[in-house]
Image: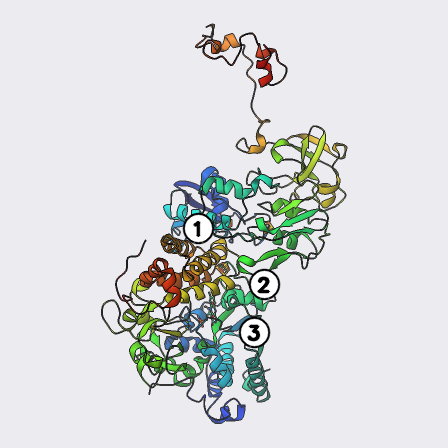
Amino acid sequence: MSEQPLFKVTIDNITIEVPAGTTILQAARKIGGEVAPPAMCYYSKLQGSGGKCRTCLVEVSKGSEKDPRPMPKLVASCRTTVMDGMEVKNITSPKVQDARAGVVEFLLLNHPLDCPICDQAGECHLQDLSYEHGKEGTRFEFQKRTFHKVDLGDKIQLHMTRCILCYRCVFTADQLTKEREHGVLDRGDHAQIATFIQKNLQNDFIGNVIDVCPVGALTDKTFRFKNRVWFTKPVDAHRNCSNPDCCGEVQLWMRGDEVFRVTARKDEWGEIKEASNGKTGWICNECRFEKKDVKDWVIEGPTKVNRHSVISQGHYVGVTKPNETFSAVMKGRDPKLLMDIHSVSEVNKPNIELSLLDRPAHSTDFNQS
Amino acid sequence: MGVKLLLEKAHVENIRLYDVYRREGGYRSVEKALKTMSPDAIVEEVKKSGLRGRGGAGFPAGMKWSFIAKPEGVPRHLVCNADESEPGTFKDRYLMEFIPHLLIEGLIVSSYALGSNDTYIYIRGEYAWIVDILEQAITEAKNNGWLGKNILGSGFDCNIHVQRGAGAYICGEETALIESLEGKRGNPRIKPPFPAVKGVWDRPTVVNNVETLSAVVPIINMGGEEYAKIGVGRSTGTKLISACGNINKPGVYEIDMTISVEEFIYSDEYCGGIANGKRLKACIPGGSSVPILPANLLLKTAKGETRYMNYESLSDGGFATGSMMGSGGFIVLDEDQCVVKNTYTLARFYRHESCGQCSPCREGTGWMEKILHNIECGKGKMTDIDLLWDIQRKIEGNTICPLGDAAAWPVAAAIRHFRDEFEWHVLHPEEAQKRNYGLAHYADPIHVPV
Ligand SMILES: Cc1cc2nc3c(=O)[nH]c(=O)nc-3n(C[C@H](O)[C@H](O)[C@H](O)COP(=O)(O)O)c2cc1C
Ligand code: SF4
Ligand code: SF4
Ligand code: FES
């Protein structure tokens, strides 16, 4: 086997070595953290994806060791491969920050920002992007573009108003299903994702478009409005799926013993994870939509969720309860009372011992006496 | 009279017919090329001629040809870009309509040079009647042995296919054209790979404009060096200019690129001056995508030198005080024209024609149109002008294909040179609905936000 040559690339002053053919984005993801540019349209498991949203633009300040000239324009890091000796600026480039702020503004221009009623909230890449790079106000003083909601079959709903035209679902439909029934109609800011015309999507794997959609434009009708994702608890599980192309490894989104939703497993970049049996982690519609009983699944354990995610609230992974006793922590000193609340406030009547209540205190508790 | 190489015979009666075209010396270049020259020698000749692409970007044609990859056993293709949809540009239409055999002749020679056995003409859907003209010319050429198998006993096979577009401007962009030719949605591809390596059906492909490929005929007939003597500097040969707007004689003119802009507008040989005795206000010299120039910067460069109708001179001063040759769509505006309205019209066009793949172009073009519409109909604010500037700045250079830039440049140039007119629209919304700003101050140096 011939060795892949390794290229040295420096991104935001951090140098790493990656195999030839790696994109700048993948190299930056290897470094991780802030250095990895945000990516809204690129999806490593979908051939031909990327290059469209322009959030991943970076500045190439040195082309390569051989040809050190900088690239004249910002480039889409998801579609530009590294060269040996390349130097890239992402967060260290004011030009990139400026262009990215522009792109975020453009992406939000016609977006309804209806997060409070959107099922994707909490796991939406656009929400994260605007939180990190967006501005508080908008300079857009016109009516936003809207579309009617469309059902693509009885399991998937398309709400084009929220779509950012990343084309991920088009690539998914193209590459995972036998007949492509899913594409883009019209062009420019009036372009829309459509199945010509409002056709049912009946392919076994079409459900995966829900997972690749970075926003709430494609949602699971078996889950819509049932729960907020951060109230559910993600659990890794698997089953022996009879569909040869389905990896059978999923995440169950549970509350108590109830399975609210089944999705593919995602990695830290929000992309589908490779399954342990080597298959790409796509799952079939049966696993996704039909198997909503815990008994259908072999539970592996809680999913590791990044602690910055809203989904991890209430169930942090890797947090340990201290074993030491209180006095051990205090190293023998007694706790010192700084101020007795009862001496300064009339609200808390000293005769009410709040710690004795087996529920949250209520105003009526204070009226009793 | 300037030299004419392309349209010299265009008005010979019945030149559309093969017999007449042949009698007038047509297809000589095919004989010369296929019988006496190797494909590489033709590429060399085109390189020597200094011919630059006539489709807009002005990239040297010979150089482009020499980049085409030649992997063993993979067919190569030549594609003729006849999508001509840029507002203000109608030169290819004229050429194809009046002297179609010239294009066919150029295509045969170019196909031979590039080794393309199947050559395509991708023609704008609205040019429906020209498709018939081209098809007829192709049939005649085939019947007379200029197309088909083993042309002139050279062993070279070539067929030309005409493919109609469906009316999208974006399909003029070469990679979108390729997608469309393959039967897909006309979205520009992300480069690299470039068409010279992976074009139509992933095969090496060269895309050239109608006029570029037609110019190969005189180059072969007279030799590249002779061709290069016409014109000036890196603007060699002749160029077709489609002139329109407020001029006395709109139409398609073939110029050698030594004449001044002033001569082109005012001489009777060309535009014949501004119509109705009005005065010149501004001009978009190279098709709707290039920056608009006020009269003073159009006729003279910022250094006070005469501006000429060629690639270098028109772009002298960069975008701050210059423009571009572009595709040769020369749009003249007289003192009665409103720059705000004109800019709005262009913005509307680009908004409608954006393919919608990349967010800056998709969203930015729509936003600019809406703001310009507000200013135009008296609802604009002073901050809108700076906002427009900021939007165009964030589109330019950040998109997949140059349509984003093409949408940004006209807005940028209009604000750069005519900011006072925009401000007047904002400050006098009612008056602006009734009368035009006219010529006042259009020549003053104007503050530009950076
Ligand atoms: C949005 C857009 C539209 C274009 N439309 C045309 C066109 O209608 N005709 C054309 O010849 N070139 C057009 N071009 C330029 C082509 O991409 C390409 O550069 C040209 O066909 C190359 O031919 P040339 O080297 O002979 O000029 C367009 C480019 C862009 C970005
Ligand atoms: S529906 Fe979702 S996945 Fe499809 S293009 Fe729109 S945002 Fe992307
Ligand atoms: S710049 Fe505009 S036309 Fe070109 S690819 Fe992007 S969206 Fe499409
Ligand atoms: S992720 Fe690179 S352009 Fe969208």
Q: Secondary structure at mark 3?
A: loop
Q: Amino acid at mark 3?
A: Gly
Marks 3,2: beta carbons within 8 A: no
Q: Which mark is residue B185?
A: 2
Label 1: chain letter: A
Label 2: chain letter: B
Q: Secondary structure at mark 1?
A: loop
Work out whether disc 1 and disc 3 sit on a shared chain.
no
Work out whether disc 3 and disc 2 sit on a shared chain.
yes
Rate crowding at label 1 as few (under 14), some (14 to 19) or many (20 or more) other CA atoms within 10 Å. Answer: many
Residue B299 point in image, percent of width and height: 28, 73
Determine if the C-beta at disc 1 is less than 8 A from ligand 4: no
* Distance (Cα) linking label 1 and label 2: 32 Å
Residue A30 point in image, percent of width and height: 49, 40
* Mark closest to the chain's N terminus, 3 or 2: 3
Residue B143 point in image, percent of width and height: 59, 88
Q: Residue at x 47, y 54 (%)?
A: B360
* Distance (Cα) linking label 1 and label 3: 42 Å
Front disc: 3 or 2: 3
Q: Residue at x 25, y 74 (%)?
A: B306
Q: Which residue is mark 3?
A: B125
Q: Secondary structure at mark 2?
A: loop
Q: Which mark is residue A83?
A: 1
Q: Amino acid at mark 1?
A: Met
Q: Which mark is residue B3?
A: none
Front disc: 1 or 3: 3
* Distance (Cα) linking label 3 and label 2: 15 Å
Front disc: 1 or 2: 2
Q: Residue at x 36, y 58 (%)?
A: B426
